[in-house]
Image (spheres, helix red, strand yellow):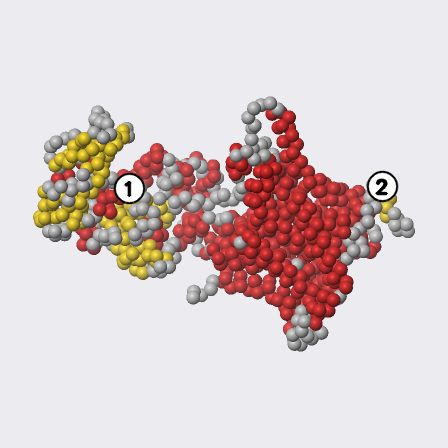
């Protein structure tokens, strides 16, 4: 890896100059790593530390000690409900996004020139539009007389629909990119060898789109598990998801260790899922 | 005109599905009927109500200032990082990519909770600075990805040519690298601005007594559909479309679109 | 305007008629993309078991023609008949032809075995039967020990053989090859040309080979078709095309040629009387039929038919512009008054090397020349 663009003629002070360059090069990365270390890594470490502490109910001070009390609380039946629901809704919405998003992404990847551009813009605009507005738009829709007149609101279904609606572009885009990369001659070759449309899809297109499928599922599935805004708006505060429980601990209840334990558990679980999924799908390399 | 394929029909339905609710919100913002269960004639009343609401105006101002600061800082972080990554070793680059990816994918609640604890621990008052700090964590990640995608298409040849012609490092950066990065910087800036303006969770945790617009709207939205909220939402949507059109106009739709799509894919592929 | 070979000429070049229908028949086939006509009213018959090449420059329509036969492109007009069966409306997967693509189009997510087996699996061939047949084909193409390799581990030549095996295993009535050797280096290309020719004669399938490389086509084919501007300029054996081109266009495409302007004074295809435009001298040379007295014509002379420094036969005086020793040949460029620059080629190892600017004589015999319409 070349460490610099030039080698200066005249070797008067090459060593010092080169060292300065290297320092400078490293310095470029400093803001990024520095900010990440302070405002991202440190908070996560803090969460782990707090999760192992204990809260004094009366004085609301946190006592440090190594206890897994908060973690056992996590698995209490009260909150297990919200946790299970979060998982199910997240998985369900992810699958829905995949099933609906795949044909759309495939269609767009088959278009050329202006048409493809217009379609991509049409997908990106909702993605760019305020998340809040889009979720709110769902409440508008679900309030309509002919859609139950608001009866569908405050249900797990509404939340699932909201997640599906908000995250759909996030599934379509990586799928589109993966499908776009597939050489059209592979499709032709499959047809030439006798494979009909469905067979081509099953045996060639989907396997080659696998990286995109995995990417899309992670981009949708992982953040949606910790969703907070959507359940609040579409669940009316009556249907709780993981994110709501966590937020509650910090904003109303004040039980920081418990909130921290919840957060750390979520992080750990998601990390494991991501690693497993990527390991499973990562064996094939797309040419 | 050929009979549209099944795929085309599905795509059309999905697009309708994606846009319809937003259009409904915008239309309802003009709905004279207070209860919104039917059309009550067009009116700009809710807009003026929202516009004259002092809470809304101050929240808007807070959000804009935060978003501007966030954009500046995010770019200051992302541009050097993207340039550094070009020449960094594979392990260092993996660390950068990993942390960038994590900042995007990790549920916002977790990151926000952690930051909340951090500021409490060091007794730092919650407000504008903490909001900005929180936003930058994930917006700089988006900016980094977009810029990295762009940097990947550049070769060092042009900079080498500039060096050959006698330009020092800073001048090379200013006269060759930066102009080449301009499209990505614009897209990144607009995207970061929009995301910062739109953020709820981090702002809710870290704003203390300061109120940002999304947090304000969020509070109102929990009581479901009201006309004024529709107006604000419609206004926000228009803002989005304006920023998007701006980027399209400044860059050409093709460049901007390919950049966002490519950035999404880079994030996903990490 | 590129002159089309008249139908009568095609028939004269066809293999002798038998009771067996042609392997492929293209009947007045056209293909238009928007306002561009990529293929213009093509008529062609391919005999069973022959190795036929379509050659032409980029954009001449040869690849489009191949794709129409494969079923990957719909003709806007005309019928395509394969082994007596009209397949024009049939999609690619239902046709009994297979294609070897230009960049092989091997499935990257499958290994060599699975690539070759792809079409068989589609036909529900399974288990031992599948293993046996794939194994046999891998032997035919010389890759028996690479069955489990990933495509990206293979060299260009090996990939090409996988692509070949993948198609041949399905025993198509016609195999279409779209410039498959383009990505290979010269030596490998020669090797693969031999392999293809051997495989074809061994298997007995009709091959339709598309390439822009005239030498390659000549080396392998029984018959060659020259295309230009969407139209078939000439169809015939390699010797026919080289020695007796129907037009200046064909003559230029299949080899270097010198063109001398002339007017026909009389005679017939066996020997036309000509007046050379350059200096008015009279000549006699064979040529394409149908040239009437008074017609403007071109006298085609191959570089190897010209002799430098000789004074026997018809002699033109000129000045040497350039001498290049190419190894197997020495090539001279001579400027002749009224004829422009002529290219002369000499394959003798001791060919003379005069200097540029020297006055030299270029000689030829009328019987070695060929007359075409202007």
Residue A96 locus on image (x, y percent) = 61, 58
The kind of secondary structure element at disc 2 is loop
Residue C40 locus on image (x, y percent) = 29, 56
Q: Residue furthest bottom?
A: B40
Q: Which image quadrant for residue C321?
A: top left
Q: Is residue C345 above or below residue B109?
A: above
C48 displayed left or right of A41: left
Q: Nearer the viewer, residue C283 or A176?
A: C283
- Which chain does the numbered disc 1 sit on? C
Q: Nearer the viewer, residue C239 or A127?
A: A127
Residue drawn at (24%, 39%) of the image: C256
Q: Give the residue pinned by disc 2.
A: A65
Q: Which image quadrant for residue A155?
A: bottom right
Residue C308 locus on image (x, y percent) = 18, 31
C340 displayed left or right of A54: left
2 vs 1, front mark: 1
């Amino acid at each position: 890896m070349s460490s610099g663009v030039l080698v200066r003629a005249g070797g008067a002070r090459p060593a010092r100059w080169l060292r300065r360059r290297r320092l400078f090069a490293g310095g470029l990365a400093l803001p990024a790593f520095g900010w990440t270390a302070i405002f991202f890594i440190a908070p996560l470490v803090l969460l782990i530390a707090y999760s192992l502490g204990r809260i004094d109910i009366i004085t609301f001070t946190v006592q440090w000690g190594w206890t897994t009390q908060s973690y056992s609380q996590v698995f209490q039946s009260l909150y297990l409900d919200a946790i299970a629901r979060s998982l199910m809704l997240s998985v369900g919405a992810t699958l829905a996004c995949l099933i609906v998003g795949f044909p759309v992404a495939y269609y767009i990847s088959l278009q050329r020139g202006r048409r493809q551009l217009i379609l991509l813009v049409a997908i990106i605009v909702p993605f760019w539009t305020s998340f809040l507005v889009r979720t709110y738009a769902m409440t508008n829709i679900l309030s309509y007389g002919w859609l139950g007149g608001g009866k569908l609101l405050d249900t797990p279904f509404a939340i699932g629909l909201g997640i599906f609606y908000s995250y759909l572009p996030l599934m379509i885009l990586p799928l589109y990119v993966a499908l776009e990369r597939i050489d059209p001659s592979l499709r032709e070759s499959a047809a030439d060898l006798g494979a009909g449309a469905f067979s081509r899809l099953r045996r060639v297109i989907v396997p080659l789109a696998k990286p995109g499928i995995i990417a899309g599922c992670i981009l949708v599935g992982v953040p949606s598990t910790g969703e907070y805004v959507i359940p609040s708006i579409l669940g009316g505060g009556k249907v709780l998801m993981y994110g709501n429980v966590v937020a509650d601990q910090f904003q109303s209840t004040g039980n920081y260790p418990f909130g921290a334990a919840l957060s750390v558990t979520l992080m750990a679980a998601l990390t494991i899922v991501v690693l497993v999924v990527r390991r499973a799908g990562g064996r094939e390399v797309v040419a | 005109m050929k009979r549209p394929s099944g795929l085309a029909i599905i795509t059309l339905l999905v697009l309708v599905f994606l846009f319809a609710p937003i259009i409904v919100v915008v239309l309802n913002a003009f709905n004279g009927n207070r209860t919104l269960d039917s059309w009550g004639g067009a009116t700009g009343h809710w807009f003026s109500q929202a516009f004259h609401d002092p809470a809304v105006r101050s929240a808007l101002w807070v959000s804009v200032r935060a978003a501007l600061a966030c954009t500046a800082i995010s770019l200051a972080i992302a541009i050097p990082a993207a340039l550094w990554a070009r020449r960094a070793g594979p392990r260092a680059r993996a660390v950068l990519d990993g942390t960038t990816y994590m900042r995007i994918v990790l549920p916002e609640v977790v990151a926000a909770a952690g930051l909340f604890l951090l500021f409490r621990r060091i007794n730092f008052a919650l407000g504008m600075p903490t909001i900005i700090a929180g936003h930058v964590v994930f917006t700089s990640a988006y900016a980094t990805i977009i810029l990295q995608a762009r940097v990947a298409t550049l070769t060092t040849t042009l900079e080498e040519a500039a060096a050959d012609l006698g330009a020092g490092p800073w001048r090379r950066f200013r006269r060759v690298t930066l102009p080449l990065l301009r499209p990505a910087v614009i897209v990144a800036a607009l995207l970061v601005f929009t995301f910062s303006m739109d953020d709820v969770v981090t702002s809710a945790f870290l704003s203390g007594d300061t109120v940002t617009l999304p947090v304000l709207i969020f509070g109102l939205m929990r009581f479901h559909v009201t006309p004024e909220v529709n107006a604000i939402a419609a206004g926000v949507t228009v803002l989005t479309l304006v920023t998007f059109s701006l980027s399209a106009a400044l860059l050409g739709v093709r460049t901007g679109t390919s950049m966002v799509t490519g950035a999404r894919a880079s994030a996903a592929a990490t | 305007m590129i002159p089309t070979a008249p139908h009568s000429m095609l028939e004269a070049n066809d293999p002798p008629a038998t009771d067996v229908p042609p392997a492929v028949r293209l009947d007045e086939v056209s293909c238009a993309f928007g306002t561009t006509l990529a293929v213009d009213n093509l008529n062609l018959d391919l005999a069973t078991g022959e190795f036929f090449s379509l050659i032409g420059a980029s954009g001449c329509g040869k690849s489009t023609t191949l794709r129409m036969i494969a079923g990957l492109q719909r003709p806007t007009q005309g019928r395509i008949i394969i082994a007596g069966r009209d397949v024009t409306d049939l999609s690619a997967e239902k046709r009994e032809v297979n294609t070897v693509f230009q960049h092989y189009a091997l499935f990257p997510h499958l290994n060599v075995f699975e690539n070759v087996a792809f079409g068989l699996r589609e036909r529900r061939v399974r288990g031992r039967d599948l293993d046996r047949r794939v194994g046999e084909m891998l032997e035919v193409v010389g890759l028996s020990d690479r069955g489990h390799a990933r495509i990206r581990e293979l060299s260009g030549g090996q990939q090409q053989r996988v692509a070949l095996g993948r198609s041949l295993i399905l025993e198509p009535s016609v195999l279409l090859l779209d410039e498959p050797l383009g990505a290979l280096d010269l030596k490998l290309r020669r090797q693969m040309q031999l392999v293809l020719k051997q495989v074809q004669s061994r298997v007995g399938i009709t091959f339709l080979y598309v390439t822009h490389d005239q030498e390659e086509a000549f080396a392998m084919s029984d018959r060659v078709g020259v295309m230009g501007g969407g139209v078939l300029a000439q169809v015939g054996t390699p010797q026919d095309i080289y020695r007796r081109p129907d037009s200046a266009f064909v003559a230029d495409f299949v080899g270097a040629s010198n063109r001398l302007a002339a007017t026909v004074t009389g005679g017939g295809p066996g020997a036309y009387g000509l007046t050379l435009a350059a200096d008015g001298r009279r000549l006699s040379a064979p040529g394409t039929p149908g040239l009437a007295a008074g017609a403007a014509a071109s006298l085609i002379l191959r570089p190897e038919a010209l002799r430098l420094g000789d004074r026997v036969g018809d002699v033109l005086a000129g000045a040497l512009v350039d001498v290049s020793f190419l190894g197997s040949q020495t090539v001279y460029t001579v400027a002749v008054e009224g004829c422009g620059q002529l290219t002369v080629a000499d394959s003798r190892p001791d060919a003379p090397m005069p200097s540029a600017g020297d006055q030299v004589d270029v000689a030829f015999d009328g019987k070695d020349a060929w007359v075409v319409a202007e």
